[in-house]
Amino acid sequence: MTIKEMLDMGADTLHKACVNEYKLDAWYLLSYYLGINKSKYYMRMNESVDDLKVAEYMSYISRRAEHEPLQYITGEQEFYGLLFKVNENVLIPRQDTEVLVEYVIGISQGRTVLDMCTGSGCIAVSIAKCGNAAAVSASDISEDALKVAEYNAKNKQADIEFIHSDIWENITGSYDILVSNPPYITDEEMEELDAEVYAHEPHLALRGGCDGLVCYRKILNGIDGHINDNGVICFEIGCSQAKDIIGLMEENNLSDIHVIKDLAGLDRVVWGRYKAVEV
């Protein structure tokens, strides 16, 4: 069997399994497995492949045919120009979250940053590598997620303090910037998620309670003593949640609140300034 025939067989298998972008996914898995780009493929497409390599490639295809996300099969995902390790313990980084990172990098000069609910660490690592923060910390309730985040930080030589914490439980410091992409999917929306997301990505990082706002409330209710005066709170949000989150921010002494839209024109980030309560 040639490399081209192997690719065709993979695409045909994914097509029969009703994978939407079956040709593209078959190519990504071939490129990942053989370590080749398009130009090398066209140079080598008629080369013969031994049965063992075909079987190994088709084992990846079989996993994708079961609708396991491509990123969990390859174990990697690009985000903000960096390649991150991912597995079933963390959400797959999405391009929409780059809007959040872009904003925080722009205000991070010389400031201390806490990334709460860090997951894969893609936000914290991107800020540490691409910004000029004085210090970056990151926390998560999941020890398994923190292992992934710590690997990504070490791999990218990013100096980050990691804290195992359920929201503020083990956070002792105070910060100039809090950034977070917390779980915000409502219970009702969870049942309507794409099957690939629902079956494979961690529900702990997705489920935000009946209204999707549980984590936002917990974070905002605990900011006193943890966010410096005139500090910035910056959240990624669901596209229909801006009004509710603005209300929660106003209830917790935040002002100068703004909404930032993503590339699709949907509300994606809400940020505001915190006024410390005088004791």
Image (cartoon, rainbow, N blue to C red):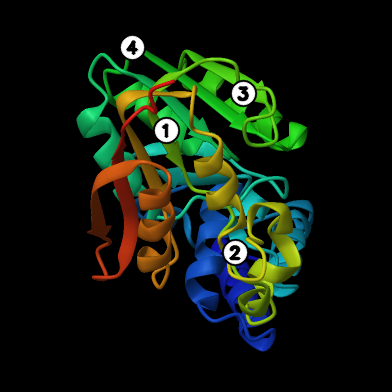
Q: Nearer the viewer, residue 194 or 252?
A: 252
- Give amino acid for label 2: Thr
Residue indicated by mark 2:
2
Q: Is residue 263 left or right of residue 212?
A: left
Q: Quadrant of residue 71 in the image?
A: bottom right
Residue indicated by mark 3:
150
- Look at the image and tell me in which quarter the C terminus lies: top left
Residue indicated by mark 1:
178
Residue 207 visible in the shown view: yes
Count up the numbered dots.
4
The residue shown at (46%, 27%) is 114
The residue shown at (61%, 22%) is 171
Task: Look at the numbered discs 1 and 2 and tell me whether their residues touch, using CB distance below 8 Å.
Answer: no
Check disc 3: other Cα within 10 Å, few if <14, some if 14-19, many if 20+. Answer: many
Check disc 4: other Cα within 10 Å, few if <14, some if 14-19, many if 20+. Answer: few
Q: Nearer the viewer, mark 4 or mark 3?
A: 4
- Above or below for 132 versus 38: above
Q: Residue 73 placed where, x, y %?
A: 67, 53
Q: CA distance from mark 4 to mark 3?
A: 19 Å
Q: CA distance from mark 2 to mark 4?
A: 53 Å
- Give amino acid for label 3: Glu
Q: CA distance from mark 1 to mark 3?
A: 19 Å
- Give amino acid for label 1: Leu
Mark 1 or mark 3, earlier in chain: 3
- Above or below for 131 versus 190: above
Q: Nearer the viewer, mark 2 or mark 3?
A: 3
Q: Nearer the viewer, residue 170 or 5?
A: 170
At mark 4, the secondary structure is loop
